[in-house]
């Protein structure tokens, strides 16, 4: 009997982990944006020679994060039913809009990563920062 209970407990734990996975992963990715963003802010304010390689590497990281991020919204991870997410229902009801917000963010990050000088970097980076807020406005709500 004890054995059966242990097995059942393990199965239950496994199920919970499987359901919580994508939510935790997408939230972790968002938090990880802070690293490359800090580098980007430094580059945009820097007074020394512009470091194009550092910009490219920070932006490559953001692009990779976002490509993964947009795949982490499976059915069953919508807000409601006690699920701890700041994602809004619009991600599922307006999937095309959410996809477009990710595509624009990735495009602006690539543009910033390809900038040859600080002026071009600042322009693309500003637009990219605007994308964070634009997406959050529609697709990120208050914590459930
Ligand atoms: C295409 C949409 C989109 C873009 C672009 C975007 N975010 Fe988010 N962000 C979200 C969503 C959706 C959530 C809520 C995720 C959840 O709770 O399941 C979120 C959550 C967050 C969180 C909270 C993470 C947590 O749970 O602690 C931070 C911090 C964050 N974003 C920062 C950023 C920054 C900085 C940028 C720009 C560099 C950015 N985001 C760009 C959609 C986006």
Image: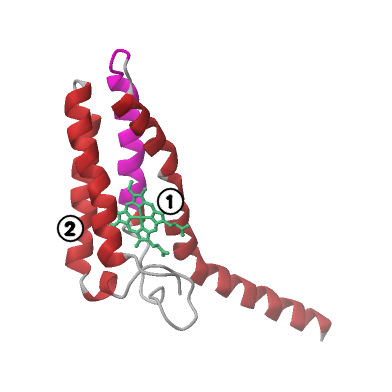
- Residue range corresponding to the magenta coloring: 48-68
Percent across and percent down for residue 92 are 27, 73
Foreground of the two, 6 or 118: 118
Establish whether ligand 1 lies closer than 8 Å to the Cβ of label 2: no
Q: Is residue 42 left or right of residue 21?
A: left
| Ligand 1 quadrant in view | bottom left
Which residue is denoted by mark 1 in the rendering? 29
Tell whether position 80 is magenta: no
Classify residue 73 by image quadrant: bottom left
Q: How many marks?
A: 2
Which residue is denoted by mark 2 in the rendering? 100
Residue, x 44% and y 63% (percent of image)?
Answer: 22
CA separation in Å, label 2 and label 1? 19 Å
Quarter occupied by the N terminus:
bottom right
Percent across and percent down for residue 127 are 19, 43
Q: Is residue 52 left or right of residue 31?
A: left
Q: Is residue 5 shown above or below 48? A: below
Residue, x 27% and y 21% (percent of image)?
Answer: 52
Classify residue 15 by image quadrant: bottom right
């Amino acid at each position: 009997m004890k054995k059966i209970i242990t097995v059942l407990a393990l199965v239950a734990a496994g199920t919970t982990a499987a359901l919580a996975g994508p939510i935790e992963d997408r939230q972790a990715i968002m938090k990880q944006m802070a690293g490359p963003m800090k580098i980007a802010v430094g580059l945009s304010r820097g007074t020394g020679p512009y470091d194009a390689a550092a910009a490219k590497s920070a932006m490559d990281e953001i692009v990779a994060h976002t490509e993964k991020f947009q795949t982490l919204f499976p059915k069953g991870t919508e807000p409601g039913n006690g699920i701890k997410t700041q994602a809004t229902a619009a991600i599922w009801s307006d999937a095309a809009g959410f996809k477009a917000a990710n595509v624009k963010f990735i495009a602006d990050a690539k543009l910033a990563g390809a900038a040859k000088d600080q002026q071009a970097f600042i322009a693309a980076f500003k637009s990219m920062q605007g994308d964070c807020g634009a997406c959050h406005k529609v697709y990120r709500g208050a914590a459930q």
